[in-house]
Image (tube, grey):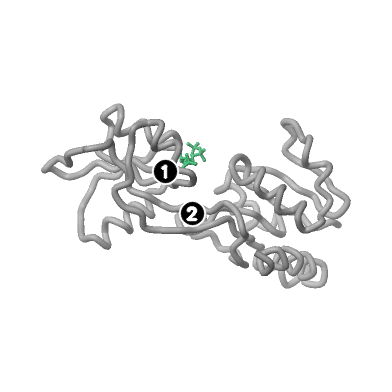
Amino acid sequence: MKPVIALTKGRLEKQFLAYFESLDFDVEPLLDKGRKLRIETSEFSFFFAKGVDVTTYVENGIADLGVVGGDILIEHKPDVYDLFPLPFGHCRMALATKANYEWPNQKKRIASTFTNITNAYFKEKGESVDIIKLEGSVELAPILGLADAIVDIVETGTTLKENGLVIADEFLHFSARLIANRSTLKVKRQQLVPVIERFKKGVNEE
Ligand code: PRP
């Protein structure tokens, strides 16, 4: 059986393909996948899922390996081997507000998808805040008055800029990471180690 690799849909997808191609892997079947969620290449079985679900599939041994943003690992702490950083998907975690925003005197309301990261950030500052969980487009929250600020990932900064938000603080930097199921890595060692080494080669050459 071919190794099974879970890939994060969306932003990381294109960057992964470019990286994969640079390592001389067969990417042809992945380039024109349309809406298909599972793709077979000559060497691997791939499937595409949301980042947090990639970790669930890897944790449960459905996928041997996974490519996921470091933000997801910090937020959800899945029980997987976090092998190494990959040379793409570079982002940072930021606290952002409307430009020239005057913070209220009462408890701040912070909207985020990353509630654990937000909680840890404010705990370290010794500040008690109300955290509002959103599933996406969190930039809307300060604009519409749901929150005073957001904690979210920033890659190019375009989304903040185009929505009139500015960074108040930056506190975590991360990239995409290669993860593996803990027991599969032992059981399928012979098959997986050469693949992992090949991924690593690209990292070392960066
Ligand atoms: C992420 C993040 C920001 C945006 C930042 O959202 O939540 O909205 O990317 O990227 P930028 O700095 O390059 O503009 P994503 O596109 O992953 O979708 P989401 O809103 O569904 O989380």
Q: Which mark is residue 71?
A: 2
Name the residue at 41% across, 58% down.
172
**SS category of the residue bearing label 1:** loop
Is the CB of the residue bearing disc 1 within 8 angstroms of ligand 1?
yes
Instruction: State yes or no: discs 2 and 1 in contact (Cβ < 8 Å).
Output: no
Q: Nearer the viewer, residue 142 or 107?
A: 142
Horizontally, residue 151 falls left or right of residue 203, namely left
Q: Is residue 93 above or below residue 99?
A: below
x and y percentages locating residue 159 in the rendered image: 44, 36
User: What is the three-letter code of the residue carrying label 2?
Assistant: Asp
Horizontally, residue 145 falls left or right of residue 24, namely left
User: What is the three-letter code of the residue carrying label 1?
Assistant: Thr
Which quarter of the figure has residue 85?
A: bottom right
Q: Which mark is residue 113?
A: 1
Q: Residues within 10 Å of mark 2 (few under 14, many from 20)?
A: many
Name the residue at 20% across, 52% down.
128
x and y percentages locating residue 174 in the rendered image: 50, 58
Which quarter of the figure has residue 80?
A: bottom right
**SS category of the residue bearing label 2:** helix
Which quarter of the figure has residue 75?
A: bottom left
Cα distance, mark 2 to mark 1? Answer: 11 Å
Name the residue at 76% across, 41% down.
38
Q: Is residue 7 above or below residue 136?
A: below
Q: Residue furthest top?
A: 144
x and y percentages locating residue 76 in the rendered image: 48, 55
Q: Is residue 147 above or below residue 155?
A: above
Q: Residue furthest right?
A: 42
* Of the image marks 2 and 1, the number of the one nearer the N terminus: 2
